[in-house]
């Protein structure tokens, strides 16, 4: 929400070619007879709105304000949030304060080791035992517990802890044991875009591929122009259930935008994590960027309306005895207000 200051843009100059092109666009718009209200529909952009969203979050943080969404930053806390809303989460097999304390011998044949912080799969290890070592489900490499501990310690943050959870298996017939991500783009209780994504390349170093869908299951082609269309990726078999869960969770987060991650298995779908400030925001096809931009604006308006109804946006008048009240002669109900003209 827009409580922080937007970053100012550096001054720039427009060369003759751009100035000529800009004037040509203006002339064509003037000739079309479109009004400013009609042109307003050309402006929404999800990437632009998200940049404001991100900048304002940083601005609020710089004042010492801690956004309550940070309560969902730690993966184990986000999983508990989802569980309390009736969404399945992977079973926890053990928790440790630092990587060196992980009790490898207590864990089953397959399991996943994670840090409570971090994104992009950097500190996520889906492991299958191979003698005294493990097969890394993301890279296919054989790794030792010592190597995993050293990798986790190299990225350790003071707020992080570590846990092992059950190894969720991809549905039968898939090309990988590890389930693909199903990511929903949510706007305060409404889902407008769903993405099935292969590994994001953080550790596996493989190219990203995606399939995009509308929440009703309609496939969208070419949504992300710079990313390969993932023909090998599965159609989300639990799409209606995932959309319903996303609507419920995103309404509970109470922000204009949040991305939610899920995994699909033969046993159903499971919650992955909450990303209120997801990195690597995708470059979207222009019409989809506009649609999601409109969704953001709509979500922000609905959120403000709900907060106002709850009294959270009421005006503070301070000492009531010293505040002049509007008279009948200067009431907006009886006269035009100069600022409302």
Image: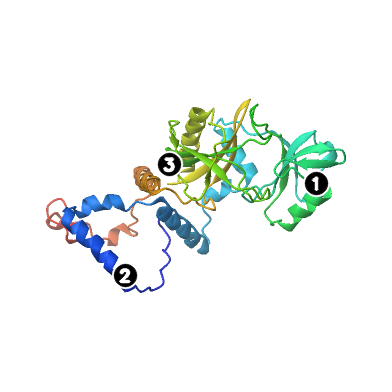
Q: Which residue is mark 3?
A: 188
Q: Position of residue 168 (x, y in %)?
A: 67, 33
Question: Marks 2/1: CA distance?
Answer: 56 Å
Q: Position of residue 107 (x, y in %)?
A: 80, 36
Nearest the viewer among 114 and 209 is 209
Quarter location, residue 77: top right
**Sooner in the amino-acid sequence: mark 3 or mark 2:** 2
Quarter location, residue 273: top right
Observer able to see residue 1: no
Q: Position of residue 122 (x, y in %)?
A: 67, 50
Marks 2 and 3: in contact by CB < 8 Å?
A: no
Please give left or right for residue 9 compared with residue 21 in the image: right
Question: Marks 1/3: CA distance?
Answer: 42 Å
**Dot 3: what SS?**
loop
Label 1: how many residues lie within 10 Å, few (<14), some (14-19) or many (20+)?
some
Q: Which residue is mark 2?
A: 17
Q: Position of residue 340 (x, y in %)?
A: 19, 57
As drawn, the label of residue 143 is 1
As drawn, the label of residue 180 is none
């Amino acid at each position: 929400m827009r409580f922080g200051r937007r970053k100012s843009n550096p001054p720039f100059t427009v060369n003759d070619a751009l100035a000529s092109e800009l004037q040509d666009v203006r002339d064509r718009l003037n000739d079309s007879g479109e009004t400013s209200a009609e042109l307003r529909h050309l402006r929404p952009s999800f990437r632009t709105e998200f940049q404001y969203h991100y900048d304002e979050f940083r601005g609020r943080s710089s004042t010492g304000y801690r956004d309550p969404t940070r309560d969902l930053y730690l993966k184990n806390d986000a999983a508990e949030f989802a569980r309390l809303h009736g969404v399945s989460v992977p079973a926890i097999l053990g928790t440790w304060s630092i990587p060196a304390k992980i009790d490898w011998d207590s864990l089953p044949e397959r399991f996943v080791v994670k840090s409570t912080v971090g994104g992009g799969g950097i500190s996520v290890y889906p492991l299958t035992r191979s003698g005294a070592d493990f097969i890394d489900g993301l890279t296919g490499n054989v790794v030792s517990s010592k190597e995993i501990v050293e990798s986790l310690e190299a990225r350790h943050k003071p707020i992080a802890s570590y846990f092992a959870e059950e190894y969720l298996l991809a549905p039968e017939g898939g090309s990988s044991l590890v389930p693909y991500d199903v990511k929903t783009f949510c706007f305060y209780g409404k889902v407008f875009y769903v993405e099935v994504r292969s590994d994001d390349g953080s550790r596996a170093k493989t190219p990203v591929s995606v399939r995009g869908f509308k929440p009703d299951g309609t496939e969208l082609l070419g949504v992300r122009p710079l990313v390969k269309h993932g023909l090998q990726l599965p159609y989300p078999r639990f799409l209606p259930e995932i959309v319903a869960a996303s609507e419920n969770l995103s309404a509970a987060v109470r922000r204009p935008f949040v991305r939610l991650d899920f995994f699909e298995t033969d046993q159903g779908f499971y919650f992955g994590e909450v990303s209120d400030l997801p990195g690597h925001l995708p470059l979207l096809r222009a019409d989809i960027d506009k649609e999601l931009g409109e969704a953001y604006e709509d979500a922000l308006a609905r959120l403000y309306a709900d907060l106002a109804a709850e009294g959270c946006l009421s005006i503070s008048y301070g000492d009531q005895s010293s505040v002049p009240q509007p008279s009948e002669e200067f009431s907006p109900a009886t006269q035009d207000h100069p600022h409302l003209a």
